[in-house]
Amino acid sequence: PLSDGNIQDFKNEASVGEPIIGDLTINSDTTLGPQKIDGDLSITGGNTLTVSGTIWVTGDIKLTGGGVIRLAESYGDNDGTIITDGIVELSGDSEFYGSGGEHSYPFVITTSSCPTDISCGGKDAISFGGGSGTVGLVAQNGTVNISGGSALKAVTGKTIVMGGGAELLYDS
């Protein structure tokens, strides 16, 4: 689990860059970071978001239709972070890649307490179905639901539900 201080540090790192006001849809291969997105982030249609610094999304994150998140080579053997205050929906053959370094992984972190919060509409904090890659998922206040042939490297959640071919490959 991450401390409130860790969470705030990630948000502070992302706030260094010029903020994007409103929802952002990645319609072509794009490099971002550090960056705060004051809205939702969507990546679809086989497009790639290359993370070059910490990204903070105040809304929801959706990765579908073969969307890709990868860390820039500059991360080396280090991990990178995308943090959100909303829910995370990862599906439809979404893929994740580190920087190419041996133990480099993107981490997707949410502060959401879904599905217990009334504003969640019954959705989980993170739903991961039909995707794979070198990714760590963190929803320490909510539920992580992993299904549909998904594979990932690390997961932390208040509740974790796995089914339908989900696979966790822990890399210490």
Image (spheres, rainbow, N blue to C red):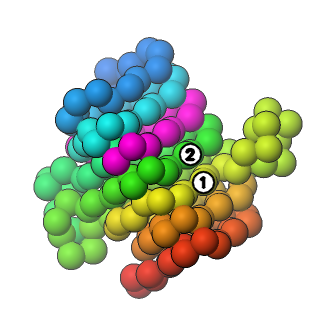
In the image, taking residue 72 as reference, residue 91 lies left or right, namely right
Front-most of 41 and 167? Answer: 167
Amino acid residing under circle 1:
Ser
With respect to residue 57, does 75 lie above or below?
below
In the image, taking residue 29 as reference, residue 87 lies left or right, namely right
Front-most of 132 and 33? Answer: 132
With respect to residue 143, does 42 lie above or below?
above
Q: What is the residue that sits farthest to the left in this orientation? A: 73
- Magenta region, residue range: 51-66
Q: Tell whether position 6 is magenta.
A: no
Q: Answer yes or no: is residue 14 visible.
A: no
What residue sits 35% from the left and 67% below the top?
134
| Quadrant of the rendered image containing residue 58 | top right
User: Residue 88 — which label?
Assistant: 2
Q: CA distance from mark 1 to mark 2?
A: 6 Å
Is the residue under label 2 in contact with that under label 1 (CB below 8 Å)?
yes
